[in-house]
Image: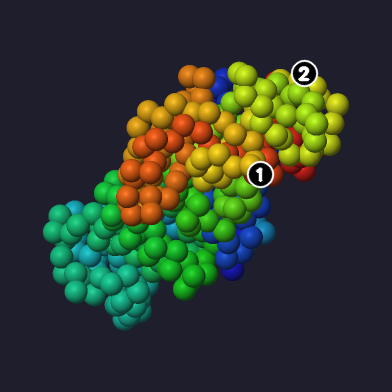
Amino acid sequence: MSGVNLESIVKRYGAVQVVHGIDLTVAPKEFVVLVGPSGCGKSTTLRMIAGLEEISDGTLTIDGRKVNNVAPKDRDVAMVFQNYALYPHLNVADNIAFGLRIRKVAKKEVASSVAEVAEILGLTEYLDRRPADLSGGQRQRVAMGRAIVRHPKVFLFDEPLSNLDAKLRTQMRAEIKRLHNRLGVTSIYVTHDQVEAMTLADRIVVMNDGRIEQIGTPMELFNNPVNVFVASFIGSPPMNQFDAVVAAGDSGPMALIDGSEIALPHLKELENAVGHAIVVGMRPEHVIVGKSKKYSALPIELDLIETLGSEALLHSRVNDVPFVVKAETKGEIEHLKSVSEVSIDKDLIKVFDKKTGMAFGHPASQ
């Protein structure tokens, strides 16, 4: 299997630079997801790997071979697009086989390859249908089949599920993950949906403004975001963040949040930081409903409850700053309607420098 290596990759459009010297190594068989807001450069980066965009500076290698000036058809990569890009006048079998026929593969081999891929993707009974006769999920599977049938070194996915409804997206996420586990092909996937990134990726690359903010496993990024951007982008709902000032407490550093005192984790950077401006981060999942003698208390003003079945999101405010708590419903929500206080475990709090946005205690910020 083939790895992909990006070294100091830059993309310019005239005088405007949109990708700023990124470095990334994708190991053979790895599933890497590029995630970030619209305009962060993730799709441009994917298109440079595919050869659909010219690389302005830097070196791109696939399977150890420099491919900066290699034509897309000679890079041995297969791309699945957002809009499926199927030929409407061809049936499913011919759409899947198109790339093989262009390469003048023998008819017998084409037929067996199409049959094999159709079986993998559950498309066998649809081979005679045209794209217009298929559902969105079926069309996406055909687009994936066209990529799989070539046995490429690398799969590239450009927001392939964004046109599907919520239920189909969930189903297709599972299918893509199973497919990768079965085929083991190096895969690079672009999405703006961090839930897709968390569920699919071996590693996630968080991008912002043409730069890589952090690379890590889904849980590494969730538990140890390197800065306030990653903390706010990874997680659903995102991490609650408050501006605060460090104060000295009887048993360790405290955060002053508009009159409330919250115990902070014992971090070296906070030892002599009294008066320092910080951002305090709290995951909605880590907030405890009600008062606890063991943890710091924080008064909240409850606005509304968003019921999700076994869980509920408590949308509230702390001194006019939005604050979300994820709580168990226990089969009903009456006990949540009167919540006016929550408790915070200091060991689950993340602390960021207000000026730089970098996390205290994170190896990358040392």
Q: Are marks 1 and 2 in contact (CB under 8 Å)?
A: no
Q: How is the image coloured?
A: rainbow
- Determine the residue positioned at 64% across, 42% down: 293
Q: The N terminus is located in which quarter?
A: bottom right
Q: Amino acid at mark 1?
A: Lys
Tell me which label, 1 or 2, sits earlier in the chain. 2
Q: Residue 265: percent from the left, percent from the top? A: 73, 39
Q: Tell me if 266 is positioned left or right of 71 in this view.
A: right
Which quadrant is the C terminus positioned in?
top right
Would you call the spot at circle 2 few (<14 residues within 10 Å), some (14-19), or many (20 or more)? few
Residue 223 x/y as whole percent: 62, 47
Q: Residue at x 44, y 36 (%)?
A: 339
Give the label on residue 131, or none: none
**Can residue 188 be seen?**
no
Looking at the image, residue 71 sits to the left or right of residue 176; the answer is right
Q: How many marks?
A: 2
Q: Residue furthest front?
A: 293
Q: Is residue 128 above or below residue 77?
A: below
Q: Which residue corresponds to mark 2?
A: 275
Q: Mark yes or no: residue 271 visible.
A: yes
* Residue 277 figure quarter: top right
Label 1 crowd bin: few (<14), some (14–19), many (20+), radius 10 Å? few
Q: Which residue is mark 1?
A: 294
- Could you say which is closer to the camera, residue 137 or residue 144? 137
Residue at figure coordinates x 57%, y 52% from the top left: 218
Q: Amino acid at mark 2?
A: Gly
Q: Which mark is nearer the camera, 1 or 2? A: 1
